[in-house]
Image (tube, coloured by chain):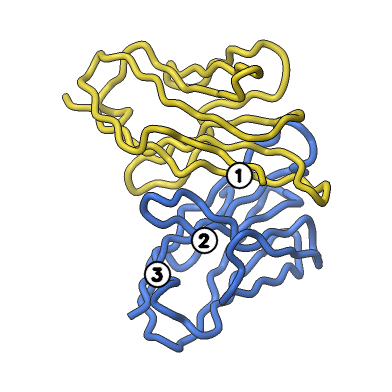
Chain colours: A blue, B yellow
Amino acid sequence: NAGVTQTPKFRILKIGQSMTLQCTQDMNHNYMYWYRQDPGMGLKLIYYSVGAGITDKGEVPNGYNVSRSTTEDFPLRLELAAPSQTSVYFCASSWDSSVLGYEQYFGPGTRLTVT
Amino acid sequence: AQSVSQHNHHVILSEAASLELGCNYSYGGTVNLFWYVQYPGQHLQLLLKYFSGDPLVKGIKGFEAEFIKSKFSFNLRKPSVQWSDTAEYFCAVNAPSASGTYKYIFGTGTRLKVLA
């Protein structure tokens, strides 16, 4: 199993540009998540999905959009990039998080710089 | 709102020193508790978890954590750290939100540097 994969690993965007961060998991997990990690701030949840066709906002959704057309894929879209979106983005997946004991599996991250 | 607090943001230790990283959470019901580790340049990996049973849980690489329900704490410990333990450590709680859905909440992390 490849686990959770993310592309690209690095990206530099100009202000106002758009891009999609790709995330794929091959563990047949229902739940998928997008986090951003900023120094000293820990992980902030952007969006999550409990299954194909179902998504919901996390703690910091503004400026982002997601879709979940398949169980495997959970892309994150930035429509109008802003410097405040400079961060490291992690995708994660898990089994049903309402069942006790299931941990999240993380991808390697995408380092995004907006200038 | 639920929250997770990690009191130490930066910790510097010499090799063979003992480690204890604090984690407190604010939720009164049943919770899942986790410690994740992020080695430099890598993604987060599970170190250990607690969801029921023995409150002292053992994880990989000699780490352990103790769940103390009365103190809402889940502190991470290791008797003797190694240089390779240099990493960032995140405490996380999985608990039901006000809407009933379960959500993960991560602490802000503790950066550990072990001096050889």
Residue at x 79%, y 40% (from the top left corner) = A98
Residue at x 42%, y 72% (from the top left corner) = A84
- Tell me the CA gap for discs 1 and 2: 22 Å
Residue at x 31%, y 19% (from the top left corner) = B81
Question: Quadrant of the rendered structure where residue B21 is?
Answer: top left
Task: Look at the numbered discs 1 and 3 and tell me whether their residues touch, using CB distance below 8 Å.
Answer: no
Camera-side residue: A112 or B102? B102
Height in image: B42 above or below A49? above
Mark 1 belongs to which subunit? B
- Nearer to us: label 1 or label 3: 1
- Tell me the CA gap for discs 2 and 3: 17 Å
**Element assignment for label 2:** strand
Q: Horizontal placement of A71 versus B81: left or right? A: right
- Nearer to us: label 2 or label 3: 3
- Tell me the CA gap for discs 1 and 3: 21 Å
Task: Give the amino acid type for the residue marked by disc 3 in the picture.
Answer: Thr
Q: Position of residue B7 (x, y in %)?
A: 42, 33
